[in-house]
Image (spheres, rainbow, N blue to C red):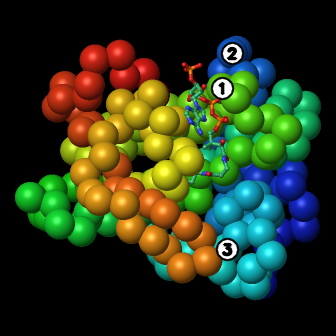
Amino acid sequence: MDAGDGLNDGAAPVGREPASESAVGPIPAAATRPLRQTLLRPGAPAEQSVYPGDDDAPTVHFGAHVTGGGLVGVASLYREARPGADHPEAPAWRLRGMAVASERQRAGVGAALLAACVAHVEGAGGTELWCNARVPAVGFYERAGFETVSPVFDIAGVGPHVVMRRPIGGGEAPRGASG
Ligand SMILES: CC(C)(COP(=O)(O)OP(=O)(O)OC[C@H]1O[C@@H](n2cnc3c(N)ncnc32)[C@H](O)[C@@H]1OP(=O)(O)O)[C@@H](O)C(=O)NCCC(=O)NCCS
């Protein structure tokens, strides 16, 4: 697998989030793989950290770098309709591979990555951002304005999930949504 040569091989960061002391910017697909492997597929074959569509033209990968340091968080966006959507023709985007290094969690890095994802979808004219959320992470997505739209389902070897969505651009996001 092409997993890059370390945790610091992404492109130069472009944004800055003072609250998290990290900068979020686009990174190559290969740079996402070490954190995906560690946080999302521990012990699984490395190829499971390569997702379908990783290299498709609309796909974008974001990384969060600590100031002067390495990559501590990743998230990826795919132009993909949500299964069961009322309007499958609407320009929806799927969020995948959301992962923050264990020692950097609960410090705003995930929220900064999600904000970059929302901004990208808004900029691309998307109307919905959705994901298959791990049940232990549901509160994180709710905090960012996502709502659960499916029953709990199991992904073999990973655990229980729900589908969550956040409307983009139409002012439908729940009150208090910030990311
Ligand atoms: C889920 C994850 C991405 C969150 O990233 P993070 O950097 O820790 O999140 P943040 O610090 O930016 O948290 C943003 C807000 O969500 C809250 N939050 C974070 N994780 C949460 C959780 N698991 N449950 C409930 N709330 C959570 C934070 O308290 C914070 O709330 P606040 O704004 O009121 O202070 C990270 O914990 C992670 O990588 N976990 C392991 C991999 C994983 O489960 N990824 C998601 C796959 S669907």
Inter-mark Cα distance, 1 to 2: 7 Å
87 and 56: which is toward the camera: 87
In the picture of the structure, the residue carrying the numbered disc 2 is 19
In the picture of the structure, the residue carrying the numbered disc 3 is 49
Report if residue 123 is visible in the image: no
Report if residue 7 is visible in the image: yes
Residue drawn at 19 percent across, 25 percent down: 171
Q: Is residue 32 above or below residue 47?
A: above
132 and 72: which is toward the camera: 132
In the picture of the structure, the residue carrying the numbered disc 1 is 108
16 and 174: which is toward the camera: 174
Residue drawn at 80 percent across, 76 percent down: 43
In percent of width and height, residue 142 lies at 41, 34
Instruction: Say what secondary structure mark 1 lies in.
Output: loop
Residue drawn at 22 percent across, 44 percent down: 127
Does the CB distance between marks 3 and 1 fall below 8 Å?
A: no
**In the rendered structure, which disc, 1 or 2, sits on the residue that comes first in sequence?**
2
Ligand 1's quadrant = top right
Inter-mark Cα distance, 3 to 1: 24 Å
For ligand 1, tell me if the residue under mark 1 lies within 8 Å: yes
Identified by mark 1, the residue type is Gly
Question: Is 169 positioned to the left or the right of 111 in the image?
Answer: left
Instruction: Say what secondary structure mark 3 lies in.
Output: helix
Q: Quadrant of residue 91?
A: bottom left
In which quadrant is the C terminus drawn? top left
Does the CB distance between marks 1 and 2 fall below 8 Å?
A: yes
